[in-house]
Amino acid sequence: MTRSKRPSEIAVGDDLPQYDLPMTATVIVSGAIASRDFMPAHHDKDFATGQGAPDIFMNILTTNGYVSRFVTDWAGPEAMLRSISIRLGAPAVPGEPLQFTGKVAKTTEQGDQWLIEVAVRAANSLGDHATGTVVLTLPAD
């Protein structure tokens, strides 16, 4: 079992390990289906390109899921997500891997737990797909 990070191991400015997500049509379509988002732009290339997109593209719920995974994989199993606030930009489309990066922006002790704020970014060659912050808690040391 993976051990969670301890607050004493985390400092403002720490970089999270980069995570690269291969972007395939299967990833996009399965995320849309799992989140019950049947908008054709997430599974029908002709519809998506007809709307001006370069291809089918990932929905925001799937992006939120991958942002959550990125941060909790780093923090460990005792991490509890408190908030995710992201802004979408460039589309996540097949053949354009997403590169997730993050940096610890703030740490605050609150009784028997610590609030950790992480600035996150998911980008591909088209630009920033998602930028924002994630706040999580970890038990105190």
Image (cartoon, grey):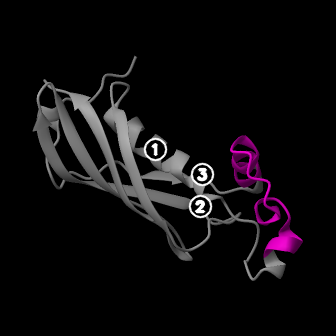
Is residue 20 shown left or right of residue 131?
A: right
Amino acid type, label 1: Ser
Give the SS element for disc 2: loop
In the figure, is residue 138 to the left or right of 88?
Answer: left
Comparing labels 1 and 3, the label whose residue is closer to the camera = 3
The quarter in which the C terminus is drawn is top left
Q: How far apart are the two marked residues, 1 and 3, measured between alpha carbons?
A: 11 Å
Name the residue at 56% across, 77% down. 126
Residue at left offset 25%, top offset 31%: 138
Residue 38, image x, y percentages: 80, 54
Disc 2 crowd rating (10 Å Cα; few below 14, some 14-19, many 20+) is: some
The residue identified by callout 1 is 68
The residue that mark 2 highlights is 97
Q: Earlier in the sequence, mark 2 or mark 1?
A: 1
In the displayed structure, 75 sits above or below 37; it is above
Percent position of residue 42, x then y: 76, 60
- Image quarter where the N terminus lies is top left
In space, the residues marked 3 and 2 are separated at their CA atoms by: 18 Å
- Please provide the residue range marked out in magenta: 27-48
Label 1 environment density (alpha carbons within 10 Å; few <14, some 14–19, many ≥20): some
What kind of residue is marked 2?
Answer: Pro
